[in-house]
Each structure stands twice: as structure tokens, then as C-alpha cells.
């Protein structure tokens, strides 16, 4: 199943920079592992925001919830998820 996730990160201004740097490094490692295994299909930055749009290809809602809640930045995120379906007029091959 494909899902579009809009993730907005809101780190507290009071968070020490060393802690913020460490959590961002863990986030990068976690997200890149999911990209390598094919479940995090697309990752796009939102210009001018600490936010992204991502496409996930997972078995079901529960798997997506597990992946998202495992993000090191999850406690500091607002996430909106939209289930996706293939459009019948799409000319590109399935990924």
C-alpha cells in the first residue's frame, strides 16, 4: 500500500544544539535504512520549512504506524497521512 506523509518537525527552541544534532543523525540513519529496503520510496524537502513529503510503500496501516512512530524525531513531528491509489491515467510503469 502506498501512503503520502507530510511531516513537519518542531524541535523545541530550548533543546540543546548537541541533542538536536544527535537526534537528527539518528533520524538520518533510520530513514536511510528504510529507503534502502524500499519502504520509504520518496523523500522531498519542503522549501523554506523544516518539513517533508514522503511516500511509503508498506503492507498496511499498522506497518506505517510502526515505521513513523519509530522515527527519532517522531515526538517532535506533526504528521498527516494520506492513502494513495494508482491513477488510471498514469502512463509511467509501476515502481
Image: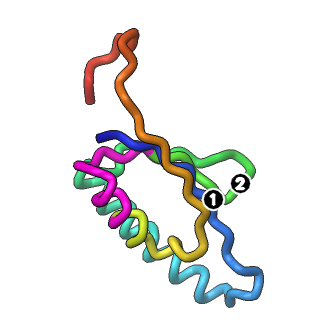
| Whole-percent x, y for residue 78 in the image | 61, 62
Task: Tell me which numbered mark, 2 or 1, is placed earlier along the sequence.
Answer: 1
Residue 49: which numbered mark, if any?
Answer: 2
Give the SS element for disc 1: strand
Write the residue at 33% across / 53% down: 61
| Whole-percent x, y for residue 29 in the image | 38, 69
Which segment did they paint magenta? Answer: 55-66
Write the residue at 63% across / 59% down: 8
Would you identify the image quadrant in which residue 41 lies? top left
Q: Which residue is mark 1?
A: 8
| Whole-percent x, y for residue 89 in the image | 39, 9
Instruction: From the viewer's side, name the closer residue of 64 and 10.
Output: 64
Write the residue at 44% across / 67% down: 28
Q: Is residue 46 magenta?
A: no
Relative to 18, 95 lies left or right = left
| 53 vs 24: above or below | above
| 11 vs 19: above or below | above
Relative to 49, 34 lies left or right = left
- Tell me the distance, in whole angstroms, between the alpha carbons under discs 2 and 1: 8 Å
Image quadrant holding the N terminus, namely top left
Query: How many other residues sit within 10 Å of disc 1, few (<14), some (14-19) or many (≥20)?
Result: some
Query: How many other residues sit within 10 Å of disc 2, few (<14), some (14-19) or many (≥20)?
Result: few
Mark 2–mark 1 contact, CB under 8 Å? yes
Give the SS element for disc 2: loop
Amino acid at each position: 500500500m502506498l501512503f503520502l506523509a507530510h511531516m513537519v518537525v518542531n524541535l523545541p527552541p530550548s533543546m540543546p544544539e548537541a541533542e538536536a544534532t544527535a537526534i537528527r543523525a539518528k533520524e538520518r540513519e533510520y530513514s536511510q535504512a528504510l529507503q534502502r529496503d524500499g519502504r520509504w520510496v520518496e523523500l522531498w524537502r519542503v522549501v523554506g520549512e523544516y518539513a517533508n513529503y514522503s511516500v511509503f510503500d508498506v503492507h498496511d496501516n499498522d506497518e506505517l504506524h510502526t515505521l513513523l512512530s519509530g522515527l527519532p524525531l517522531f515526538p517532535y513531528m506533526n504528521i498527516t497521512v494520506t492513502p494513495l491509489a494508482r491513477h488510471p491515467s498514469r502512463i509511467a510503469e509501476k515502481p
